[in-house]
Image: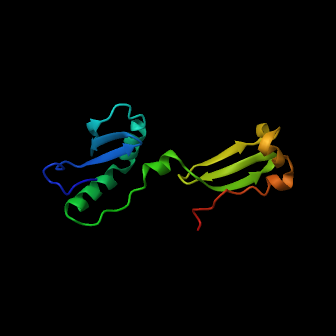
Amino acid sequence: MYYLNNKRHKLPHIHVKYQEQEAVLRIPGVIFLKVSSGMDKLRLVLAWIEIHKDELMADWELATKGEKVFQIEPLQVIMNPRVKNVKAEDNYFIRLWFSNGEIKIFDMKPYLRSGLFSELKEKSVFYSVKPLMDQYNE
């Protein structure tokens, strides 16, 4: 959010950048002020804005008054949820807990035939599965 230049930034809006792409979106009720060609993640951005529109407007009001804004969960977390926890279950299923709150059950049997995952055929190895990096509980 840019808000200090009152001549250029009168309307509440956000600037979104993804790699070389950029969009400027007015909030609430998204209006496209500027979108670079090929903004292929725009639907994800629009969903993020919809989820956080009240927080965005509250931050805009605070910012224009010179007050500290609140941190809003970034889109990156929504786009790339991380595995928080893993539990091996019977019959070579694993239960996965993700940083975005989702829980999924994954069947590992098709992957046990060859390659790196073949070691998991050994039950003691399979039941020792854990997240690669426990960054959320540090």
Q: Is residue 126 left or right of residue 132?
A: right
Classify residue 44 by image quadrant. top left
The answer to whether 83 is drawn above or below residue 109 in the figure is below
- Count of marks, rendered view: 0
x 37%, y 44%: residue: 17
**Residue 22 point in image, percent of width and height:** 34, 40
Q: Is residue 94 left or right of residue 30?
A: right
**Residue with the most extreme bottom position:** 138
Q: Nearer the viewer, residue 120 or 99?
A: 120
Q: Is residue 71 left or right of residue 92?
A: left
Is there any visible trace of residue 102 in the rendered image? yes
**Residue 71 point in image, percent of width and height:** 38, 60
**Residue with the most extreme top position:** 37
Is there any visible trace of residue 50 in the rendered image? no
x 68%, y 55%: residue: 86
User: By what rule are the colours in the image chosen?
Assistant: rainbow
**Residue with the most extreme front position:** 20
Q: Quadrant of the C terminus?
A: bottom right
x 82%, y 38%: residue: 114
Q: Is residue 19 left or right of residue 3?
A: right
Q: Nearer the viewer, residue 103 or 41?
A: 41
**Residue with the most extreme left position:** 7
**Residue 27 point in image, percent of width and height:** 27, 45
x 67%, y 56%: residue: 132
